[in-house]
Image: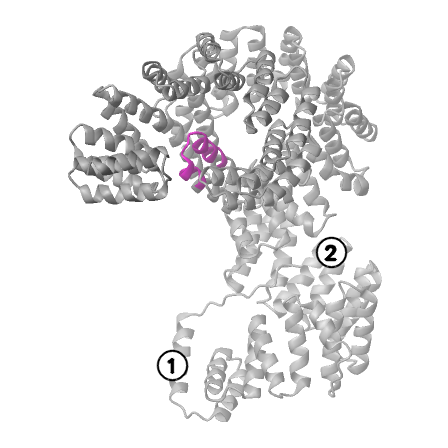
């Protein structure tokens, strides 16, 4: 059944003037509530509900506990489909003592219309009303409340209702509905015809007749019956919805559009109308309009399952599989067996090349529709994608047995056999399929791609000739020829084929991308850019082209601004698609633009709040912005949606560890490790938790287990070394880091081995390691940064400066690097100090360390006032940083502000004990005052 939603009413200007005049006249009348209610009754007899409502509200303003006024107002609201208002007023009327025979049946029906069936059954079962007709009406409502859960009890209610009032047509209709639900359609049809012979003006009877006729596949007769129901009750949204929906489902789209127009005129704007318009747009391939419409419906009625199902279909067609899956899973949560939603969900996973999920989603379909050709096809495709070629071939063979002359079925069998290594059998099946299909080319396409994979380029070209005869004007065929020629190394021929594909369809993106790759390969970056530019000029709203262009710019080393602009264009041209937003947020996050990344990630979450990929990205963006608690929430939601995904629990555990919740972190990390033993990041964090908890033996045991799992890797030795380092036992860590570096020499092992050597009085060997490693790996950023910092702490300013300069060349504009360059330059009285410092401050204006460095450079170069301001800001941002406080005191002294300096120095000597470096230096400075 469609959603029962309150319909808006349109008022013509002349009608509006009448209402305004009526309201004015009524306001001028006397304030006797009894007279007002009598006037309201008179208006209701004339079918003037609006004037009656004004009178009733005026009466209730004067006398709020007027039971009849409450009853009549509830009755009006019920007639206007305002069930919430009706329930409120009718309950008040009953509480105030109004005749329960009049109130109770209407109140119960209003509750049923609101979906509160259990409440009605619980409250009104066994209720006795004195008036037989009222009792009959109440029993009928009880039957309607029960019919979906217990047809036998519903039938008893309807039977009792007819005993109380044999002329109760709705009770008779209820009994007919029971017959129909029991699939006794012939008996039900005779029974409803008998009801209609006695009560031809009951719209519910005509609507029930329509349902029976539809079940008997008597479509035209059913539509005629439904139209009679509408003629009797033209503003009923349910009947109109059923008519339009049935027309659209049976491909009578033109008539459906006509009836939808009449529905809009009759009931005005409503979510149901928007849903049907989206359905029309979907059927007529206006997918963006359909998407916009259905999203509006879901926003207003998120639990409306037909809306979710249509949304899944629309997003599947738009290739936005993330959104499709969210909506289809919503349907299946409510109705696990829905075959349409389940088939679409399997197809969506296949479109994402996710064979595992496709198989999982497919199982209920195999159980209920295992011999249906379409289900066999999906099973074959899913198992093929998952790499289970034996099962895949078995399902495709079963389909071929059912349809031996179906070219596509035999083609799928051939593809499956090829994938399973039965190359000759597979190619033979494809050859038979090609013979069966004289015009389609589907089998030929599969045969060419199979030969291409086998690198049988000459045979593939020969098969391609047959394909192009069947598909002479298809850019896909030309693009495939280009792929074969690429495999043969014939780049000019490949280029020509791709150009032919674009000549047929200038915006055919696969061929455009292949051409762009050829140009990129030849170093013609501008030519590659021009290919996408031409498509964009003709189709400026193509989000996929902007995404492809952004990928080219990334590969070509394009500027951040260029790539960002392209991704933002993709987002703005497809604001309701997830993929552009996800790519933009990911790019911003990788580019350290964490605040902007979080904004875009939140937009994606607003669009699809329950998609695992969105939640993953949102969580990482929140962590980057320091909002770890929110990240934990995002990862918890993702883990609940993907209970079998080890990476989901890894992310959750890491976030919980960062959020100072080691107990929960350990539980989720161990759960992740139980699912996948190769997630070594999980073991690293687990070992950190064990170290923090002083469970050193467990940490060592885990590290040594990893050494056994990965005997050729240094990872387990790194972890064991880290355990010893945490106990400040560098001597024990040294042989382990040596072993790790010998097994897997990389930046991480080089840094750890150098640190162990330096701390075990092997300084010369440490220096030798650093020199030899950086000579062999000059672009190793982590090791360069580590050695630069090490040299800085050792007072080797010349070598540290050279290394930081090199880092700045390798990865420009890193604030920390620029800050250290500025500090070293200032120590060497190098005028470049201020240049480095100012650039660092531009990039990180709130960094206390950079403010401190630049402030001291300014103080020492004579710009004392400017320097003091920066140091004051730094101290405010980092009030516990003793070095900044000392520098601020020095700046105050240089500025002649001795009392300010004394205040800072007194605070420092009060904070640190005698003998501490900061106490002694502060005390020495204070004596100079």
Rendered location of residue 127, percent (x, y): 75, 81
Rendered location of residue 908, percent (x, y): 32, 41
Q: Is residue 588 magenta?
A: yes
When the figure is inspected, residue 350 is found, relative to residue 255, above or below; the finding is: above
Residue 575 placement, left or right of 428: left
The image quadrant of residue 832 is top left
- Magenta stretch, residue numbers: 582-598
Q: Is residue 310 magenta?
A: no
Residue 637 placement, left or right of 545: right
Which residue does the image show at 77% across and 72% down from the upper left? 172
Residue 672 appears anywhere in the view: yes
The image quadrant of residue 789 is top left
Residue 108 placement, left or right of 405: left
When the figure is inspected, residue 894 is found, relative to residue 492, above or below; the finding is: below
Nearer to us: label 2 or label 1: 1
The residues bearing labels 2 and 1 have C-alpha atoms spaced at a distance of 49 Å
**C-beta proximity under 8 Å, tags 2 and 1:** no
Q: Mark 2: which secondary structure?
A: helix
Residue 71 placement, left or right of 398: left
Rendered location of residue 181, percent (x, y): 79, 60
Q: In what quadrant of the picture does the N terminus appear? A: bottom right
> Residue tagged by mark 1?
21
Rendered location of residue 732, percent (x, y): 59, 20
Q: Mark 1: which secondary structure?
A: helix
When the figure is inspected, residue 605 is found, relative to residue 776, above or below; the finding is: below
> Residue tagged by mark 2?
214
Q: Of residues 182 and 361, which is closer to you in this image?
A: 361
Residue 787 image label:
none
Q: Of residues 703 and 54, which is closer to you in this image?
A: 703
């Amino acid at each position: 059944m469609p959603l029962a939603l309150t319909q808006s009413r349109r008022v013509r200007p002349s009608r509006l003037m009448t209402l305004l005049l009526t309201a004015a006249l009524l306001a001028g009348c006397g304030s006797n509530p009894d007279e007002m209610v009598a006037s309201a009754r008179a208006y209701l007899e004339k079918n003037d509900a609006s004037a009656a409502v004004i009178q009733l509200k005026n009466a209730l303003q004067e006398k709020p506990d007027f039971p009849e006024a409450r009853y009549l107002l509830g009755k009006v609201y019920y007639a206007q489909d305002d069930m919430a208002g009706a329930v409120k007023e009718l309950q008040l009327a009953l509480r105030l003592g109004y005749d329960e025979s009049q109130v109770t049946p209407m109140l119960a029906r209003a509750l049923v219309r609101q979906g509160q069936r259990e409440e009605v059954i619980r409250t009104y079962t066994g209720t006795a009303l004195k008036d037989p007709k009222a009792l009959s009406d109440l029993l009928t409502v009880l039957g309607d409340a029960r019919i979906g859960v217990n047809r036998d009890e519903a039938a008893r209610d309807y039977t009792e209702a007819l005993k109380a009032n044999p002329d109760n047509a709705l009770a008779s209709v209820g009994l007919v509905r029971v017959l129909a639900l029991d699939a006794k359609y012939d008996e039900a049809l005779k029974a409803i015809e008998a009801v209609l012979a006695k009560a031809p003006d009951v719209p519910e009877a005509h609507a029930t007749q329509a349902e029976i006729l539809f079940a008997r596949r008597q479509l035209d007769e059913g539509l005629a019956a439904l139209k009679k129901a509408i003629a009797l009750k033209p503003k009923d949204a349910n009947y109109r919805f059923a008519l339009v929906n049935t027309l659209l489902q049976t491909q009578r789209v033109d008539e459906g559009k006509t009836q939808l127009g009449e529905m809009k005129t009759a009931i005005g704007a409503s979510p149901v109308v928007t849903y049907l318009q989206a359905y029309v747009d979907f059927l007529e391939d206006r997918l963006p309009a359909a998407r916009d419409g259905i999203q509006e419906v879901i926003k207003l009625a998120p639990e409306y399952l037909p809306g979710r199902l249509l949304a899944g279909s629309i997003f599947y067609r738009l290739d936005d599989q993330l959104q499709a899956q969210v909506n289809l899973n919503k349907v299946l949560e409510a109705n696990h067996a829905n075959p349409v939603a389940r088939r679409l969900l399997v197809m969506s996973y296949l479109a994402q090349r996710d064979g595992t999920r496709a198989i999982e989603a497919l199982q209920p379909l195999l159980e209920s529709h295992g011999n249906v050709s379409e289900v066999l096809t999906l099973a074959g495709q899913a198992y093929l994608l998952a790499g289970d070629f034996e099962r895949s071939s078995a399902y495709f063979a079963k389909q071929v047995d059912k349809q031996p002359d179906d070219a596509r079925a035999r083609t799928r069998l051939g593809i499956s056999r090829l994938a399973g290594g039965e190359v000759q059998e597979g190619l033979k099946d494809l050859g038979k399929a090609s013979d069966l299909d004289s015009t389609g080319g589907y089998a030929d396409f599969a045969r060419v791609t199979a030969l291409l994979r086998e690198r049988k380029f000459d045979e593939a070209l020969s098969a391609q000739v047959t394909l192009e005869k069947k598909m002479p004007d298809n850019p896909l065929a030309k693009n495939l020829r280009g792929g074969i020629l690429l495999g043969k190394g014939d780049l000019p021929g490949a280029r020509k084929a791709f150009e032919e594909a674009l000549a047929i369809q200038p915006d055919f993106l696969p061929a455009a991308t292949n051409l762009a790759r050829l140009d990129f390969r030849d170093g013609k970056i501008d030519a590659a850019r021009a290919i996408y530019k031409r498509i964009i000029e003709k189709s400026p709203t193509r989000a996929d082209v902007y995404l492809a262009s952004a990928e080219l710019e990334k590969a070509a080393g394009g500027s951040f601004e260029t790539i960002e602009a392209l991704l933002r264009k993709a987002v703005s041209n497809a604001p309701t698609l997830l993929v552009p937003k996800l790519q933009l947020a990911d790019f911003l996050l990788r580019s350290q633009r964490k605040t902007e990344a979080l904004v875009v990630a939140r937009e994606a979450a607003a669009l699809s709040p329950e998609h695992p990929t969105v939640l993953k990205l949102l969580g990482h963006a929140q962590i980057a912005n320091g909002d770890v608690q929110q990240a934990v929430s995002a990862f918890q939601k993702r883990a609940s949606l993907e209970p079998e995904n080890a990476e989901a629990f890894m992310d959750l555990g890491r976030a919980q560890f960062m959020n100072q919740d080691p107990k929960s972190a350990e539980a989720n990390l161990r759960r992740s490790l139980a699912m996948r033993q190769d997630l070594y990041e999980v073991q690293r964090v687990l070992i950190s938790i064990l170290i923090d908890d002083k469970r050193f033996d467990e940490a060592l045991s885990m590290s040594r287990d990893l050494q056994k799992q990965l005997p050729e890797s240094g990872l387990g030795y790194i972890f064991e070394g880290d355990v010893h380092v945490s106990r400040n036992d560098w001597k024990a860590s040294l042989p382990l880091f040596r072993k790790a570096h010998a097994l897997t020499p990389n930046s991480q092992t080089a840094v750890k081995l150098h640190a162990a050597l330096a701390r075990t009085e092997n300084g010369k060997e440490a220096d030798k390691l650093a020199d030899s490693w950086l000579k062999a790996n000059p672009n190793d950023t982590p090791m360069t940064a580590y050695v630069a910092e090490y040299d800085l702490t050792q007072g080797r300013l010349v070598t540290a400066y050279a290394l930081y300069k090199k880092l700045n060349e390798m990865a420009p504009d890193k604030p920390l690097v620029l800050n250290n360059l500025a500090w070293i330059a200032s120590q060497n009285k190098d005028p470049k100090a201020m240049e480095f410092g100012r650039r660092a401050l531009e990039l990180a204006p709130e960094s206390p360390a950079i403010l401190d460095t630049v402030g001291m450079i300014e103080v020492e170069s004579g710009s004392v006032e400017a320097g003091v301001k920066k140091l004051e800001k730094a101290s405010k941002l980092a009030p516990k940083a003793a070095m900044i406080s000392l520098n601020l005191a020095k700046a105050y002294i240089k500025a002649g502000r001795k009392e300010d300096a004394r205040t800072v120095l007194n605070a420092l000597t009060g904070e640190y004990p005698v003998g501490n470096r900061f106490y002694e230096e502060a005390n020495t400075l204070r004596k100079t005052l």
